[in-house]
Amino acid sequence: MPTTKNTSYKVHVHHTDQEEVDNVNIEQGAMLHTDDALYMGHNGRNVVVYPQGGVSSLGWARYDDTFRTSLNKLSLSDGVEVQLTNNGGSTIKSHPSINFYDTTANKLLGVTENDVYVVTIVFSASAANANQTHLDLRLVGSGQIERVHKTMGFYKGNDTIQNFHEVIQYYTDATFVNDGVDIKIMADGGTAKVWDIIYFIQRTQNANFS
């Protein structure tokens, strides 16, 4: 007796908005649909499964900190490394699905392993003793990302505002995707102050479609 198979299945996917996608309790394999993309819960994150290679796969996001301003500067003690936080009080994205930075945990995020990103880190800073003080900026995580490290000097004199604009390219390994990465800063040789922090992050290569 021949076997008859049903080759037509209809699955209802809940339609929602981006705010719910960003805050929903993620379930493995559960799917959500917005006007822009189809999401599926995978390993604790909602990932875009459609459009593949489209507007949700690459893009950029700008995160402006509204806490550390000229009226509330971050004070750096000599030789003490701290997290360079950014509350993303003002955020602009090329697409609503993009999330390259966790403003609560203050961590850089990776979508998939072996992606490539570029982060532009902008801030204002001053040093009480500019001739003897420099800043050390580095990315801190559990993988190879710790090799990314930069030293920046002060050239405008004591207690004079200097604008920094640092561009860093990096790729994501498994630990980056699972744990995120911190941006840390330290004053060396004297004290310093930092404020008006901006992160502009671009995903330039999606490893799934490269």
Image (tube, helix red, strand yellow):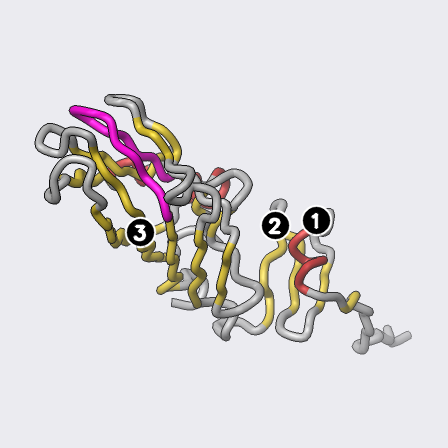
> Which span is picked out in magenta?
182-196
Residue 187 magenta-drawn?
yes
User: Residue at the location (48% across, 69% down)?
Assistant: 94
Q: Secondary structure at mark 2?
A: strand
The prevailing secondary structure element of the residues shown in magenta is strand
Q: Residue furthest right?
A: 1
The secondary element bearing badge 1 is classed as loop
Residue identifier under label 2: 45
Nearer the camera: disc 3 or disc 1 = 3
At label 3, the amino acid type is Val
Check disc 1 and report the residue beneath it. 26
- Residue at (82%, 74%) from the top-left corner? 10
Tag 1 or tag 3, which sits nearer the N-term?
Answer: 1
> Does the magenta run of residues contain 28?
no
Picture coordinates of residue 162 (x, y %)?
21, 47
Q: Percent position (x, y) of residue 141?
A: 38, 35
Q: Position of residue 63 (x, y in %)?
A: 45, 55
Q: In this picture, is 35 found above or below 182?
A: below
Residue pointed to by mark 3? 122
